Every structure is written in C-alpha cells, then in structure tokens.
Image: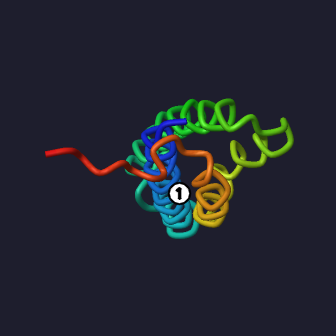
C-alpha cells in the first residue's frame, strides 16, 4: 500500500472532524440562540460533501488494508460522531503504518 492512501485518509479525517465541530457550533447558535441559519445551511452542506469524500478515502484505505467489515463500518461512522474521527484516525495510523510499501525509504544514489 502506498503512503498517499494513508495521507489522503488522514487529511480527510481531520477536515471532516473539524467541520463536524463547526457544524455542531452552528447548530447550537441556530437552535439555541435563533441566529446563523444561513451559515448553518452552508456549513451543513459543506460537511456533507466533505464526509462523502472521507467515505471514499476511508473505504479505499480499508479495502487496501483488508479490514473486516465491522472495523470498516466503525471507521466510516467515525466521521459522524463529534471528536471520534480524531481518536479513530490515530488508531488507524498506528495499525496501517507497518503495511506501507514505502515505510523504509531507500536512500537515493548519487
């Protein structure tokens, strides 16, 4: 497996997690303080698109790492639970690092 597969997943895990926290904050302002309805709409749609990209990259990583279905589902659902993606991403990186093809880079010849 290439390192780029893991890097794509990591970037989208962080972006999705941050956007979910922003969305939660917008929802608090929308329903708690009756303000920011337009911003909430934009953030929710943006998070939805980013979550779909996260699903594609997480599925790609899971299929290349040959994860069982239960583990793959947990990683996919982590993008919907605030702060869960941060913790799941760390665990995934620790498990996938040994599987990387370029884990031990060969020094370039002069």
- Rendered-image quadrant of the C terminus: top left
Which quadrant holds residue 76?
top right
**Residue 30 as seen in the image, left or right of residue 65:** left
Disc tally is 1
**Residue 14 as seen in the image, left or right of residue 59:** left
State the image coordinates of residue 61 (x, y, percent, origin top left): 60, 37
State the image coordinates of residue 27 (x, y, percent, origin top left): 54, 59
State the image coordinates of residue 78 (x, y, percent, origin top left): 68, 52
Q: Label 1: which residue? A: 17
Camera-side residue: 40 or 75?
A: 75
State the image coordinates of residue 50 (x, y, percent, origin top left): 47, 39
Instruction: Rate crowding at label 1 as few (under 14), some (14 to 19) or many (20 or more) other CA atoms within 10 Å.
Output: many
The answer to whether 63 is drawn above or below residue 27 in the figure is above
What colour-coding does the image apply?
rainbow
Camera-side residue: 71 or 23?
A: 71
Instruction: Look at 77% across and 48% down and name the residue there.
Output: 74
Instruction: Look at 50% across and 33% down and name the residue there.
Output: 53
Camera-side residue: 59 or 77?
A: 59
Instruction: Look at 45% across and 44% down and name the residue there.
Output: 102
Q: Secondary structure at mark 1?
A: helix
- Rendered-image quadrant of the N terminus: top right
**Residue 54 as seen in the image, left or right of residue 43:** right
Camera-side residue: 92 or 44?
A: 92
Instruction: Look at 39% across and 47% down and name the residue there.
Output: 38
């Amino acid at each position: 497996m290439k390192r780029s597969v893991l890097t794509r997943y990591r970037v989208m895990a962080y972006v999705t997690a941050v956007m979910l926290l922003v969305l939660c904050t917008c929802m608090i302002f929308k329903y708690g303080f009756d303000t920011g309805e337009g911003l909430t709409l934009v953030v929710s749609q943006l998070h939805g698109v980013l979550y779909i990209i996260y699903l594609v990259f997480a599925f790609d990583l899971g299929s290349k790492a040959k994860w069982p279905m239960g583990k793959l589902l947990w990683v996919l659902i982590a993008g919907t639970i605030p702060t869960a993606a941060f913790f799941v991403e760390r665990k995934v990186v620790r498990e996938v690092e040994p599987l990387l093809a370029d884990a031990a880079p060969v020094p370039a010849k002069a």
